[in-house]
Image (cartoon, rainbow, N blue to C red):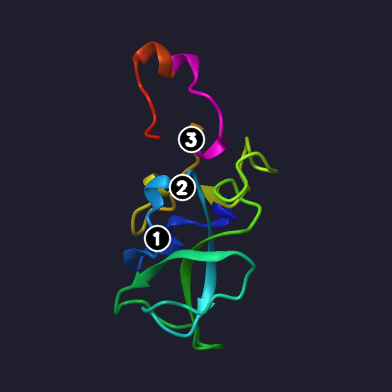
Amino acid sequence: MSALIAEVDLAHEEGLVWLEDVSRLDYVRQSLDRLPTRRGKPAYHRDGRLVGYARLGSGAKPSRSSGTFRRRVFWLLPHDRDADPEGLYATGAPAEAVDPRTLTAGNKGRKTERSEGGPPSSAMRELGITLPL
């Protein structure tokens, strides 16, 4: 879950690679996976699809016991809002979901009104702030 990802876990990220245009996605799921390399597209073994992944710098050290690296991956499941707008996540979002516009290398991102599928708050409307659609 995103809440369980600490900024220290992301200290060696040097970039994020997006495999599709995330400007049209309200949210992406993120997790830390144990992967055999610092860079390159990781194998994907979940339902749904891989949307992006983090690249690690040369300072990232592998686990002594497994030789793997902890890297962030971004993904979506078949029942997520982009594929099923009226489904389970028509409002709300999974615990591990964040707005992809808030993600940068080394920053775990956050949920937004857009990622939660809700209307703008009264404070946002009063300030004239709108979220991108």
**Crowding at mark 2 (Cα within 10 Å: few <14, some 14-19, many 20+):** some
Of labels 3 and 1, the one closer to you: 1
**Residue 34 — which label?**
none
User: Helix, strand, or loop for circle 3?
Assistant: helix
At x 37% / y 79%, what residue is drawn?
A: 40
**Crowding at mark 3 (Cα within 10 Å: few <14, some 14-19, many 20+):** many
Dots 3 and 2: beta carbons under 8 Å? no
**Crowding at mark 1 (Cα within 10 Å: few <14, some 14-19, many 20+):** few
Instruction: Return the residue at label 2.
Output: 25
**Marked residue nearer the N-terminal end (3 or 1):** 1
Instruction: Return the residue at label 3.
Output: 114
Instruction: Return the residue at label 1.
Output: 20
Dots 2 and 1: beta carbons under 8 Å? yes
User: Helix, strand, or loop for circle 1?
Assistant: loop
The location of residue 73, given as percent across then percent down, is 48, 66
Left or right of 6: which side holds 48?
Answer: right
Amino acid carrying label 3: it is Arg
Looking at the rendering, which quadrant does residue 29 occupy? bottom right
Question: CA gap, disc 3 to disc 2?
Answer: 9 Å
**Marked residue nearer the N-terminal end (3 or 2):** 2
The location of residue 86, given as percent across then percent down, is 65, 39
Question: CA gap, disc 2 to disc 1?
Answer: 10 Å
Query: Which region is colored magenta?
Result: 115-123
User: Helix, strand, or loop for circle 2?
Assistant: loop
**Marked residue nearer the N-terminal end (2 or 1):** 1
Query: In this orientation, which residue lies closer to the viewer: 72 or 24?
Result: 24
The location of residue 52, given as percent across then percent down, is 43, 64
The location of residue 22, given as percent across then percent down, is 40, 52
Amino acid carrying label 2: it is Leu
Question: CA gap, disc 3 to disc 1?
Answer: 19 Å
